[in-house]
Amino acid sequence: MFRSLAVPEFLAKIDPIKCIRCKRCIQNCGWSVYSWGGDKVLIDTFKCVKCLRCYHYCPEEAITIEDNPVKYRSNANWGFYNIRNIKKQAETGGIPLTGMGSDMPYPVLFDNLLIDACQVTNPSIDPLREPMELRTYLGKKPAKLEFEKGADGKLKLKTKMPPQIKLEVPFIFAPMSYGSISLNAQKTL
């Protein structure tokens, strides 16, 4: 049987004196932490996520869920969660996902953005400095551009360009495709 090398985050324990073997913990655990072993409840503590459903449904209050005191040795570059996530990714091929609801103290970076425009002047102080633009164009791009000389001798673009949407300030939002929203919403952005 496969045994995970990742240290479990939580330890589920059942007091054998208080337990009346009613099997409510087995019935109510959505993570399959508990199973019946003939005469007692068996615990696979690696699966426990500390949702506390078993704790609340135990009529005798025989279940306790504790944070695992065994931790990986950590340093300034990585800690318990970093090492555990790497081991879990290696075992399952999964990727730890999180968002604004993360239980980790990640900062909300968008609120802390600072644009230091001390070197941006208009007009440029010297010819080495170029203007900074955020403008971008969304749309299919041709593989190459072809030009031809017009009647006046000036170069003209021969390649037919697909439609492009000009964005003065690029916006990145997830998890939806830019094409999945209406044209009015695209123009608003």
Image (spheres, rainbow, N blue to C red):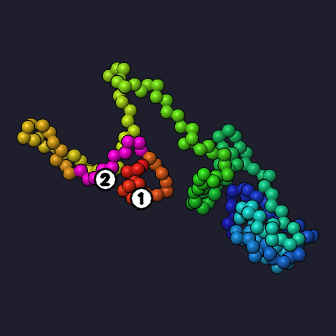
Q: Position of residue 107 (x, y in %)?
A: 62, 43
Instruction: Determine whether, in the image, residue 142 is placed left or right of residue 72.
Output: left
Extreme-left residue of the structure = 151
Check residue 167 for magenta coloring: yes
Q: Are marks 2 and 1 in contact (CB under 8 Å)?
A: no
Q: Residue at x 49, y 33 (%)?
A: 115
Residues in magenta, as a range:
161-170
Query: Which amino acid, mark 1?
Result: Ile
Q: Residue at x 41, y 42 (%)?
A: 169
Disc 2 target residue: 140
Question: Most prominent secondary structure in the magenta stretch?
Answer: loop
Residue 42 position by quadrant:
bottom right
Instruction: Determine whether, in the image, residue 114 is placed left or right of residue 129.
Output: right
Q: Residue at x 59, y 44 (%)?
A: 108
Q: Residue at x 33, y 46 (%)?
A: 166
Q: Cα distance, mark 2 to mark 1?
A: 17 Å
Q: Position of residue 187 (x, y in %)?
A: 37, 51
Q: Position of residue 47 (x, y in %)?
A: 71, 64
- Between 24 and 88, the one lying in front of the other is 24
Disc 1 target residue: 181
Instruction: Determine whether, in the image, residue 131 is placed left or right of residue 143.
Output: right
Q: Earlier in the sequence, mark 2 or mark 1?
A: 2
Residue 87 position by quadrant:
bottom right
In the displayed structure, would residue 145 be above or below residue 30?
Answer: above
Q: Which label was assigned to residue 148?
A: none
Q: Position of residue 1 (x, y in %)?
A: 69, 69
Query: Which amino acid, mark 2?
Result: Lys
